[in-house]
Amino acid sequence: MDTKKPSQGLWTWDFTIITVGSVISLIGGVLSSFAMSMMVLDYTGSVFLYALFNATYQIPMLACPVLAGPYLDRMSRKKVIYRLDFLSAGMFAGLALLLRTGWFSFPALLCFNLIRGSVDSVYMVAYDSLYPNLVEEGNLSKAYSISGMLQSIMLMAYPLGAIAYEALGGVEPLFAINAVCFFAAACFERCVRHVETHMDAAPPADGVGALKRFGRDLREGVDYIAGEKGLLAVTLYFMFSNFAGVGSDQMFLPFFRNHSALFATWPVAAVTLGAIVSTCSEAGRVAGGLLHYRFRLPAANRFPVAMAVYTTLPFLYGVLLFLPVPAMAAVFFLYGVLGVTSYNIRIAATQSYLPDEKRARFNGAYQMLTSLGSLCGTLLAGWLAEIMPERAVILLFSAVGLAAAWLFIFRRRREVAILYNREV
């Protein structure tokens, strides 16, 4: 690594505003998401229904991102971001009020998760497409290290969600906090000063209707991705990597819940212990983020480092549930360090490579394909856990992750190296 610094600073007004807004929304989100998952698992008592609930959040991500991409290349992404945060604030406030009356319906919660997934999937495409424009040239890798690190710090609050759920006996206060956080984040995001110009570079309407124009924009985005072999290889790899990683993640909480006798010597409940152990991954991401913030990885080393990470992560997950708790925590920490390295290399390389006028369409397609992998991994893992031990399920999914690294990254190493080994 080297310490070469760009000519302009990172902490501009816009970067500071978008970072503060993101942190505020994450605070409420991580608390309520864990508590909601625990509520569903306790209510149904089924790993499959728990996985199905998580899958309903992912289902809209199969269509919404790729459909939103062409529109987000023609409209203000900033307005979409803060308006969706205002909408999320209203949704969680309404849910908190309903649950306060004693109401509970699993099918209704599935519908709520579908709507939440739709909102969040469009939000992510808009956010990812706007974010690079709020960073001064030469600071993109550093900016993404901050973004990943702050997300990880917030995710370390997951054990607090478990503790609050047990102590309060419900999720209503957490949903109310989440509503306030979304509202405050939207207020901050309205203060972004960046003047968006990507709409000016969009293809002219040429007198065609909105539907035909949408179809043309969508085809242009697909053709662009198909013609960029490095981008295509990276996207396909992360689709299968998400399949393996998310499928494996579904097994962790049920393993601690279903095998609580293995952790009887620990002074906390097994599920709480599992939440605490899993946050070691986020601690690792924070440590890795600090490293990437302080040092710049030389461009020539980015692909070999990424390839090493992609082949190491499946091995770490494969052995995870066979280890004692301290070793499990250490593996999670290492997993976090490697995970944030993978994230930083991938997102800085792809977002800096993309033309601004095509960025939303690529991000939409990327979100759709990786969400497809996540959804399939979630459902398959939930089904397999009904007929096989959780450890066996994770071993199976880890093998898929390793195969994907060889098939899509190593075999396409020349194209991926061209994409990754650039100054950003």
Image (tube, rainbow, N blue to C red):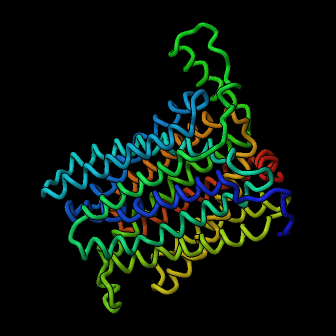
Image vertical order of residue 11 relative to residue 190, above or below: below
Count the labels in the image. 0
Q: Could you say where residue 364 lies in the image, as x and y percent from the top left?
A: 56, 37
Q: Is residue 320 above or below residue 69?
A: below
In this image, 188 relative to 95: left or right? Answer: right
Residue 407 lies, with reference to residue 23, above or below; the image says above
Residue visible at 29% across and 52% down in the picture:
93
Residue for point 52% across, 56% down: 22
Front residue of 122 and 173: 173
Can residue 386 be seen here? Answer: no
Residue 249 in the figure: left or right of residue 148 = left
Image quarter of the N terminus: bottom right
Q: Residue furthest top?
A: 207
Whether residue 284 is situated above or below residue 174 in the rendered picture: below
* 376 sits to left or right of 174: right
Q: Between residue 67 and residue 263, name the one nearer to us.
A: 67
Does residue 276 show up? Answer: yes
Look at 65% across and 54% down and name the residue there: 15
When asked about the image quadrant of residue 16, the answer is bottom right
Q: Percent x, y for residue 362?
A: 63, 37
Q: Residue at x 43, y 48 (%)?
A: 375
Q: Position of residue 354 (x, y in %)?
A: 72, 39
Foreground of the two, 346 or 261: 346
